[in-house]
Image (cartoon, rainbow, N blue to C red):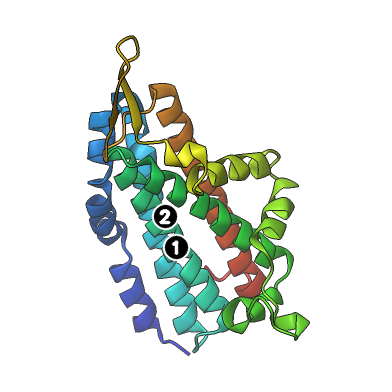
Amino acid sequence: MADKSTGNEFNKIFSDENLDKPARLDFELFKPVKAEYPCVSSYDESVFEQLKFHYYLLGKILQVCTETDGIYASTLVINGAIVRSLNNYRGALWALGNGNPHVFFDCLRSQCETLAFLHHCTLNPDYIKAATIGSRNNPDKDLKVSNILTMINKLDKIHDGICKDYDQLCNLVHPNPASLYANFHIIDEKEGVIAFTTRLPKMPDEKAILHLVMLMTWTKWTFDEIIELTKVFYGNKP
């Protein structure tokens, strides 16, 4: 078992001051978003705190590994989900601030899938085995990976409407008309002047706010599922 000095070292490494450092670097991604959409400036503190909380969770799951003298399948899944959530968040901020809705909606959809996966694991703790070493067509039912739509449908039972949101994001991410024509920009409708651009036109302010809030809400629910799943496997240790 870890001694007291190890615990003190963890507290030092994952102090509030040290957690601020990587979060501040990630927060630079939000500056272009505010420049493009000044209407989201009021979310400054909330975005920073969510970035920071990812690092807090990474520290806590690492501390659990030390205190329990081992890395388990559940540890790998929880750690992987935290990193996936953080990268989805980073990617979404970058894309929103750089006129790239294809990447933004892809990251937003991916965050929804991360949330659904964690909820599925919380409902079925034994699924951790399939999540780490399983495959989609595995003949062993305990190692068969569930379809993401199955997970989304289960998630919709506690977060009504998320299935509809996910379906709409799929239309924007898949090579459908909404996605293929996303870089189609009308310059002068009367004269029939159009442009095809790699940097897509700004979305309306209300949509920018809506989608940012959606990202933040799903991330908050992802945190809740991570904490709940950690309790399932390690009690109230974190």
Give the side of residue 140 with respect to residue 191, left or right: right
Q: Position of residue 209 (x, y in %)?
A: 43, 29
Tag on residue 50? none
Q: Is residue 189 above or below residue 201?
A: above
Residue of label 2? 88
Q: Is residue 225 above or below residue 102?
A: below
Mark 2 crowdedness (10 Å alpha carbons): few <14, some 14-19, many ≥20: many
Mark 1 crowdedness (10 Å alpha carbons): few <14, some 14-19, many ≥20: some
- Asked whether 134 or 29 is in front, the reply is 134
- Asked whether 55 or 103 is in front, the reply is 103
Q: Position of residue 123 (x, y in %)?
A: 73, 64
Amino acid carrying label 1: it is Arg
Q: Is residue 207 above or below residue 123?
A: above
- Asked whether 96 or 184 is in front, the reply is 184
How far apart marks 2 and 1 lie (CA) works out to: 6 Å
Give the side of residue 144 with respect to residue 41, left or right: right
Q: Are marks 2 and 1 in contact (CB under 8 Å)?
A: yes
- Residue at horizontal 40 percent and vertical 45 percent from the top: 102
Q: Quadrant of residue 234?
A: bottom right
Residue of label 1? 84
- Residue at horizontal 44 percent and vertical 83 percent from the top: 66
- Residue at horizontal 43 percent and vertical 41 percent from the top: 180
Give the side of residue 94 with respect to residue 75, left or right: left
Question: Number of numbered discs present?
Answer: 2
Q: Position of residue 197 (x, y in %)?
A: 27, 36
> Residue farthest to the top?
190
Q: Secondary structure at mark 2?
A: helix
Give the side of residue 140 with respect to residue 43, left or right: right
Q: Position of residue 176 (x, y in %)?
A: 52, 43
Q: Secondary structure at mark 1?
A: helix
Amino acid carrying label 2: it is Asn
- Residue at horizontal 49 percent and vertical 77 percent from the top: 64
